[in-house]
Image (cartoon, rainbow, N blue to C red):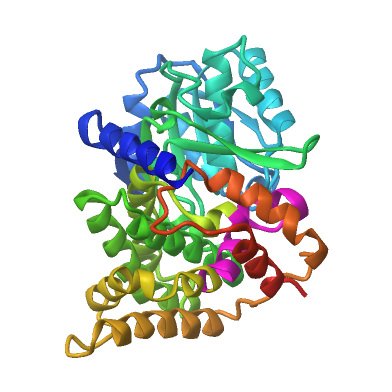
């Protein structure tokens, strides 16, 4: 079947080359937020659905959006039932709120789960006769969403610029994605002050999520020049500014650089797709509720080490671009320098190497689901077999 997968990957590459992937209009800072709201084209008194979660409401992080909407003479209605791993019910309840309040636009304020929920709520609004389960896979929406803005409060998922939205189906214990060009938000607003209240471990794991996006984009056989440039910039910024954020949480410049790195990594992987780190990570989130960023952080090195010498060229490129190695070293040494740097960074961030909730007895089932997700959708550089996948899962289990 590998030859079929490569034909499919080539078809995806042609879509990127000849059709292109849309990007949101990027705004930064409070003035950028005002500009994005104005660009929605709403009338005074119009209602806007603000999708967020209860934690952000309790922290009053929504105030900056509330003030901007009030300034624009728009009425905010909050939907905050989104879970860390959003469910189909979360989406359906958001759709109901949108209709009940007669909203004209959506502003999503939160981490990746909130931003993805905002996308799917918009998709259900324009496709009222399709269930969320019917949006799974490629190009099942194909209709422009209501006017919308995505505002990330974590520097990790890059969901404010991606074509995908992930949701959990509790009935089947599965996690899947809807993928469509129209799911790319119309506007993305980066506000570093919203990220300063994040606990250190959340800042760390979300940034490693962004690093994983960038690295898996660079490993993809569909990685073109734009994605390579964006992914490399993201890697360099994360390696430089993540330690600064850990040391000085209120450093707004460092926070802004991490947000931009996450945005760039999102632009990169939405054109190349991801790989086995995400394929396995999604199963852990669906099965055990493991936070996505943490799962990626634990899986990143085991998957990279499984590839071995087969990805030395790509790893060496990252190491050279980020100044983590010597140009005089052979490729193998440069690749090792990157792996060592990642390992040391994860250690400094106090990120665990095992996940206590993962059961070794589940490895075969999880591996089956992970490879089913990865094949054929992910243009990975080399194909993983069930035995190798099970081995990685068992290695991170306690």
Q: Quadrant of the C terminus?
A: bottom right
Q: Nearer the viewer, residue 164 or 329?
A: 329
Residue found 61% across the figure and 56% down from its top: 280
Q: Residue at x 59, y 65 (%)?
A: 202
Q: Which image quadrant is residue 219 in?
A: bottom left
Hey, which residue is sitting farthest left in the picture? 328
Q: Main secondary structure of the magenta part?
A: helix
Check the image and report above or below for 119 versus 31. above
Q: Is residue 265 left or right of residue 321?
A: right
Query: Percent from the top left, x then y, of residue 111?
Result: 55, 49
Image coordinates of residue 60 in percent, x first then y, are: 61, 49
Let me know if residue 307 appears in the view: yes
State the residue at coordinates (41%, 18%). 144
- Counting from the top left corner in percent of width and height, residue 173 is at 76, 42
> Per the image, is 299 magenta?
yes
Residue 29 lies left or right of residue 131; in this view the side is: left
Task: Write down the region rendered in magenta.
Answer: 280-301
Answer whether residue 24 is visible to the viewer in this image: no
Which residue is rendered at x = 47% and y = 64% of the image? Answer: 207
The relative height of residue 390 versus residue 223 in the rendered view (above or below) is: below
Instruction: Find residue 344 and report its horizontal and vertical position in percent.
Output: 48, 86
Quarter holding residue 93: top right
């Amino acid at each position: 079947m590998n030859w079929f997968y490569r034909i499919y990957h080539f078809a995806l590459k042609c879509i990127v080359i000849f059709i292109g992937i849309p990007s949101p209009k990027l705004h930064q800072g409070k003035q950028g937020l005002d500009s994005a709201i104005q660009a929605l084209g709403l009338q005074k008194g119009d209602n806007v659905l603000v999708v967020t979660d209860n934690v952000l409401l309790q922290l009053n992080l929504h105030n900056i959006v509330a003030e901007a909407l009030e300034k624009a003479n728009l009425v905010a209605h909050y939907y905050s039932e989104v879970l860390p791993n959003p469910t189909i019910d979360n989406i359906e309840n958001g759709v109901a709120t949108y209709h009940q309040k007669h909203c004209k636009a959506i502003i999503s304020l939160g981490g990746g789960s909130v931003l993805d929920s905002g996308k799917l709520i918009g998709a259900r609004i324009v496709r009222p006769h399709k269930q969320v389960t019917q949006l799974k896979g490629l190009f099942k929406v194909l209709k422009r969403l209501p006017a919308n803005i995505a505002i990330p409060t974590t520097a990790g998922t890059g969901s404010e610029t991606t074509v995908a939205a992930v949701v959990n189906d509790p009935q089947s214990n599965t996690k899947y994605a809807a993928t469509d060009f129209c799911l790319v938000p119309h506007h993305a607003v980066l506000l570093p002050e919203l990220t300063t209240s994040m606990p250190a471990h959340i800042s760390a794991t979300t940034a490693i999520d962004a690093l994983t996006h960038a690295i898996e984009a660079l490993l993809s056989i569909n990685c073109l020049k734009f994605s390579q440039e964006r992914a490399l910039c993201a890697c360099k910024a994360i390696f430089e500014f993540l330690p600064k954020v850990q040391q000085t949480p209120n450093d707004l410049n460092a926070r802004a650089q991490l947000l931009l790195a996450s945005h760039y990594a999102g632009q990169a992987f939405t054109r190349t797709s991801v790989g086995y780190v995400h394929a396995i990570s999604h199963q852990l989130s669906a099965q055990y509720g493991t936070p996505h960023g943490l799962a990626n952080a634990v899986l990143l090195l085991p998957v990279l080490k499984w590839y071995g010498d087969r990805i030395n060229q790509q790893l060496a490129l990252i190491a050279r671009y980020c100044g983590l190695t010597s140009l005089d070293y052979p490729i193998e040494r440069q690749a090792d320098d990157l792996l060592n740097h990642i390992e040391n960074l994860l250690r400094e961030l106090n990120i665990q190497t095992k996940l206590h909730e993962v059961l070794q007895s589940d490895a075969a089932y999880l591996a089956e689901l992970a490879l089913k997700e990865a094949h054929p959708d992910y243009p990975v550089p080399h194909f993983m077999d069930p035995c190798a996948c099970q081995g990685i899962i068992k290695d991170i289990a306690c």
